[in-house]
Image: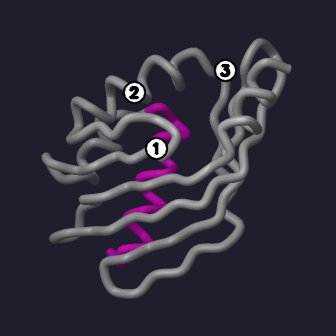
Amino acid sequence: MTSGDTVTAFIRALERKDFGTACSLITDDCEYDNVPFAKVYGPEGLRTVLEPFLGNCGGVEWVVHHQAESGDVVMNERTDRFEMAGRWAELRVAGLFVLRDGKIALWRDYFDQAQFTQAVSG
């Protein structure tokens, strides 16, 4: 599996809210840096942040517009979509993933916090 394949599998697992599979694709010390928010580490940190948020979403869809990889580094441009209270909120995101031994060791997402707040508040 290429680095890009691993990132794609990770994204698809999160869309399904399959945290077991998603966490199997990250290292035990993975750094998740959702830039407007505090960093978390490892599978437990990822679950602490994402399970409550994604659990409140009726649907999750990450549309990858572009993805490039060079060795263990993968970058993508996405529109992350979350179904909340019967409507879809969309957020434009740029993501950086760095893999180590075939697993994601760093996941950093950049997005506009104001756009996110507006999207989820309607």
Q: Return the residue nearer the eye: 114 or 116.
A: 114
Which image quarter: residue 22?
top left
Q: Looking at the picture, how far across and down is residue 51, in whole percent? A: 42, 23
**Residue 87, numbered circle:** none
User: In the image, what residue occupies the spot 23% across and 50% down?
Assistant: 30
User: Reading the chain from its start, which is encountered first: label 3 or label 2?
Assistant: 2
Using a 10 Å C-alpha cutoff, classify the residue at mark 2 as few (fewer than 14 neighbours), some (14 to 19) or many (20 or more): some
Residue extending furthest toward the bottom: 70
Q: Looking at the picture, how far across and down is residue 59, in whole percent? A: 66, 28
Circles 2 and 1, Cβ within 8 Å, touching? The answer is: yes
**Residue 58, numbered circle:** 3
**Residue 34, numbered circle:** 1
User: In the image, what residue occupies the spot 47% across and 40% down?
Assistant: 14
Main secondary-structure element of the magenta-colored stretch? helix
Using residue 13 as the reference point, say whether residue 3 is left or right of it. Answer: left
Q: What segment is highlighted magenta in the picture? A: 1-17
Coloring scheme of the render? Answer: one colour
User: Considering the numbered disc 2 on the image, is that residue within a helix, a strand or a loop?
Assistant: helix
**Residue 49, numbered circle:** 2
User: Considering the numbered disc 3 on the image, is that residue within a helix, a strand or a loop?
Assistant: loop
